Amino acid sequence: MREDLKSIFGNLSADEKITFLQSIMPEVCTLFSENPQRMMAEMMPLCRQMMEGCGMDMAQMMTMMQAMKSKSCGCTDTLGGKCCG
């Protein structure tokens, strides 16, 4: 099933991929908020690896995300397992 989903996602246009990701983000956020330690232990290293593989700077991305988050909602709790909004 996972490979099927990856294949379907891979065939979407860039706009469709963004729309899909926007639609599942509330569920992802809920999943992470239920177990923030697991998120940090399992997902952050994976994200770092992927970003480095694409030539992106993880520290710069985290800073940019924090700046965008504080502008949108005023929240400063980035690792407390709570969603903004």
Image (tube, rainbow, N blue to C red):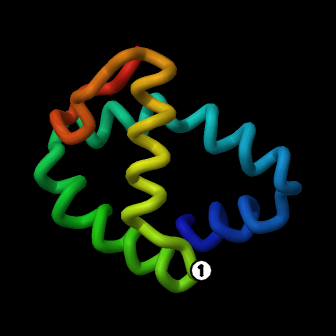
Q: Where is residue 48 in the image (x, y as percent from the top left)?
A: 38, 72
Please report the residue visible at 64 percent of the width from the left and 67 percent of the height from the top.
6
Q: In this view, does 13 lie above or below 19?
A: below
Q: Residues within 10 Å of mark 1 (few under 14, many from 20)?
A: few
Q: Residue 54: where, in percent of width, then height?
A: 59, 80
Residue corresponding to mark 1: 54
Give the residue drawn at x 54%, y 73%.
56
Quadrant holding the C terminus: top left
Seen as rendered, the residue at the extreme bottom is: 53
Q: What element carries label 1?
A: loop
Residue 80 appears in which quarter of the rendering? top left
* Residue farthest to the right, as pictured: 13
Out of 55 and 2, give the one closest to the viewer.
55
Q: Image height check: is 40 above or below 54?
A: above
Which amino acid type is shown beneath numbered disc 1? Cys
Residue ID at (24%, 66%) = 42
Q: In this view, does 25 lie to the left or right of 32?
A: right
**What residue appears at the point 74 percent right and 38 percent down from the top-left corner?**
19
Quarter of the view holding residue 31: top left
- Measured from the top left, where is residue 3 in percent x and y? 60, 73
- The x and y percentages for residue 8 are 75, 62
